[in-house]
Image (cartoon, coloured by chain):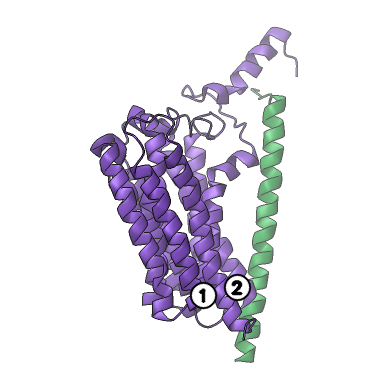
Chain colours: A purple, B green
Amino acid sequence: MAFSLGQQDETVKNMAVIEHHEAVPGEICLSEASARDFFELLKPRVMSLVVFTALAGLVVAPGAINPVLGFIAILCIAVGAGASGALNMWYDADIDAVMSRTAKRPIPAGRVRPEEALAFGLTLSVFSVVILGLAVNWLSAGLLAFTIFFYAVVYTMWLKRSTPQNIVIGGAAGAFPPMIGWACVTGGVSIESVVLFLITFLWTPAHFWALALFKMRDYGAVGVPMLPNVAGEWTTKVQILVYAVLTAAIAVVPTFLGFASLGYGLFAAALGVGFVWYSLGVLLMPEGDRAMVPAKKLFAFSILYLFAIFSGLMADHMIAAFGWVS
Amino acid sequence: METVNLTENQKKSRRGRNVALAVVLLALVVLFYVITLVKFSGGMAG
């Protein structure tokens, strides 16, 4: 090819369009997105929580599933959760670009184009649901499809920007995985799986509002109506405490329903006391405290809490199943 | 004829995406093979 140096510079400039990815009509857009950028669209950290809670549902459910199919089920649930994360990042790219916590995500940073993220999210959604249906059962596939729809459409497109109760209702999307795991084994939905759903569902507001308290200005800047910005710090702190108490209460219900032991019940109760204690710390935090250390502590503890509760449920079930303690 | 010269970064990222896609496609083939085996063996056992 016989380009002059000047022409070549011009071509290179034109090809490196991703830095200014608003393409001019007719211009050729070539992506510089790496495989890692696409992986980042899946929100791997959220995915790890989903995988863990789905696994808990799978393990705790009565009956058995072929281990290979169990692995495929968890893989499909993880990919489905990741797909909804990609769809969320596609829709929220405008506000992600403004908030410090999310400005470096692949779309606002200009590494992945919005239409690439949309296609990626839709493709993974279809594949994860269909494979789960073919390999395991269609009820769990239907629940997975509903979860993706709920997160991407009901939460991201509708609730998030319109009501301060966004994460209360939207939290359902994050709470479905253990129910899907349960449905993979049993082929149904029962009161026990609803309790597993409620643990994450009631935990979400306290977890997210703790974050919203110390990221309040970020959310305010982009006009997302998080509770602290709309109803004020005090109301948020009270509601955090209320949801922490409800979470602590529902977490011991598996013992009362007979699908977890007394040992688990005591463990969950102790963790619940910790959760309420940290929430009380937030309630007593002085108004206008900028450091918000108690809110940061509650946020960190809430993640540990959920992992511990579902770990406890799985350990309890395994101990009972394998008779490690007589 | 109008041709396109890719920058080094574009070539590198395209190679990376191609490798990732190949791995995913291969994984899908293995996945469907394994699902078939498990389903068939379950059916025969039943």
Q: Residue A263 carries which label?
A: 1
Q: Earlier in the sequence, mark 1 or mark 2?
A: 2
Chain letter for mark 2, please.
A
Q: Residue A237: x percent and y percent? A: 32, 44
Residue density around tag 1, few if under 14, some if 14–19, many if 20 or more, within 10 Å = few
Residue A268 position (above or below residue A45): below
Residue A46 position (above or below residue A194): above
Residue B3 position (above or below residue B37): above
Query: Which of A96/A301 is in front?
Result: A301
Left or right: residue A197 versus residue A53 is left
Determine the residue positioned at 50% across, 72% down. Answer: A264
SS under mark 1: helix
Q: What residue type is labelled 1?
A: Gly
The residue wearing badge 2 is A69
**Is the same chain shared between marks 1 and 2?**
yes
Left or right: residue A166 versus residue A256 is left
Query: Which of A304/A85 is in front?
Result: A304
Left or right: residue B19 versus residue A21 is right
Q: How far apart are marks 1 and 2 (CA)?
A: 30 Å
Q: Can residue A145 be seen in this view?
A: no
SS under mark 2: helix
**Image quarter (top left, top right, bottom left or bottom right) of the N terminus of chain A:** top right
Query: Which of A3/A298 is in front?
Result: A298
Q: What residue type is labelled 2?
A: Leu
